[in-house]
Amino acid sequence: MSAISGLSDLSTVAPVLFRAACPECRARFELSAGALRLAIGSSRSTTFYSFTCPECESAVRRPAGERIVELLTGGGVRTLRLHSTH
């Protein structure tokens, strides 16, 4: 996952797009922030991002490390903070 931002001049900023790939159909594509969801849990195993593949419509869930979380939140991806029940 990597972020791509467009900047045509200083007065106009294009929306941020994120490169992604589907593990099911192996398609590669760009997604807007609105097409992604980020869940931040209490550990690495409960922090992930998800999206629906635009090619095969599979639900995709991938782990998100610190750098991915930083890119997604900075790009305006909707974030859900998961709380433990302990």
Image: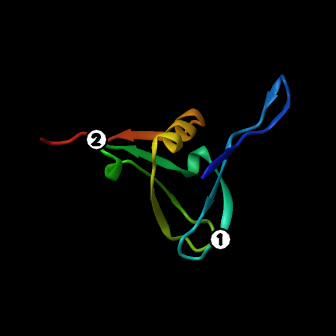
Q: How is the image coloured?
A: rainbow
Give the residue at the far right of this rendering. 9
- The residue under label 2 is 42
60 on left or right of 27: left
Amino acid, disc 1: Ala
Nearest to the observer: residue 14 or residue 26:
26
Up-down relation of residue 54 to residue 82 (above or below): below
Residue 80, labelled with which disc? none
Real-space CA distance between mark 2 and mark 1, rounded to the nearest whole angstrom: 31 Å
**Residue drawn at the location 33% of the way across and 53% of the way down:** 45
Residue 85 place in picture, x, y as percent: 15, 42
Q: Earlier in the sequence, mark 2 or mark 1?
A: 1
Nearest to the observer: residue 32 or residue 49:
49
Q: Residues within 10 Å of mark 1 (few under 14, many from 20)?
A: few
Residue 57 place in picture, x, y as percent: 55, 70
SS at circle 1: loop
Give the residue at the far left of this rendering. 86
**Residue drawn at the location 68% of the way across and 61% of the way down:** 29
Q: Residues within 10 Å of mark 2 (few under 14, many from 20)?
A: few
Q: How many marks?
A: 2
7 on left or right of 55: right
Tell me which corner region of the image, top left, top right, bottom left or bottom right, holds residue 13: top right
SS at circle 2: loop
Tell me which corner region of the image, top left, top right, bottom left or bottom right, holds residue 10: top right
Residue 39 place in picture, x, y as percent: 39, 46
Amino acid, disc 2: Ser
**Residue drawn at the location 50% of the way across and 71% of the way down:** 58
**Residue drawn at the location 53% of the way across and 50% of the way down:** 36
Quarter of the picture containing the C terminus is: top left
Give the residue at the far top of this rendering. 11
- The residue under label 1 is 27
